[in-house]
Image (cartoon, grey):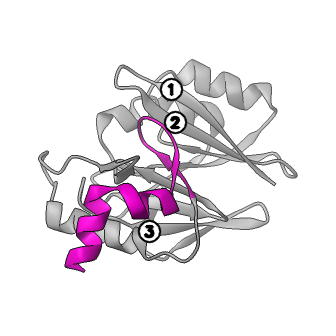
Amino acid sequence: MLSVQTVIAGRLHTNCYIVTDQETKEAAIIDPGGNAGDILNAVHGEGLTVRHILLTHGHFDHVLALEEVKNATGAKVVAHQAEELEADVYVKHGDVLPFGAAVFEVLHTPGHTPGSVCYRIETLLFTGDTLFEDDCGRCDLPGGDYDAMLGSLRLLALLDGDYTVYPGHDVSTTLSRERGHNRNMLEALRKG
């Protein structure tokens, strides 16, 4: 059984997620954007073994605590090969990372940055700054591309079934809700 704990990190209130396989006590940390002490306290307080630090993209507000968390846990850093990040493991669309009895699947979702990714595991979808409740990530920063974002949102919209969406900022939502309410996703489906 998987559990998800959220640590709100840094001045931009980035959601750092700690995903835990409750049976094995194996954990993955997604986007350590600050507050390394809070992240590490959560991990150590539960007696977790962190195998991977999964990065959705390389913007500073998602990686500020990366070095400290990596040094404290010995976890391997995972990032998309198109992102300008130092990582131990570079991934591409469709790659899988074993995690307890399940796997994280990598979905390449460019638009916010060229190497933005989402991670899917069971009925959970970690979307970084690609998909938010009723919105998508900014495309006006260096490397941003709104047409690519629409392609990524269409990819997510067409996934089979429903998922709990854990975005890089703000509140969680569901993919089924976003399919019906998110203006960017609706535009992506119209243009698809």
Q: Position of residue 12 (x, y in %)?
A: 34, 25
Q: Could you say where residue 94 lies in the image, as x and y percent from the top left?
A: 48, 77
Separation (CA) of disc 1 from disc 3: 24 Å
Q: Quadrant of the C terminus?
A: bottom left
Secondary structure at badge 3 equals: strand
Instruction: Give left or right: position of 142 versus 136.
Output: left
> Residue at the spot x=11%, y=47% of the render?
140
The residue under label 1 is which amino acid type? Ile
Local packing at callout 1 (Cα closer than 10 Å; few below 14, some 14-19, many 20+) is: many
Vertical comparison of 183 with 60: above or below: below
**Residue lying at 83% horizontally and 47% vertically, measured from the top left:** 22
Locate the N terminus by quadrant.
bottom right
| Range covered by the magenta-colored residues | 164-192
Q: Which mark is residue 107?
A: 3
Q: Residue furthest right?
A: 23
Q: Residues within 10 Å of mark 3 (few under 14, many from 20)?
A: many
Q: Residue tagged by mark 1?
A: 8
**Residue type at tag 3:** Leu
| Secondary structure category for the residue under label 1 | strand
According to the picture, the residue beneath numbered tag 2 turns out to be 16
Indicate the quadrant where residue 63 lies.
top left
Q: Residue at x 68, y 22 (%)?
A: 41
Q: Which residue is at a point 39% across and 30% down the rendered structure image?
A: 64
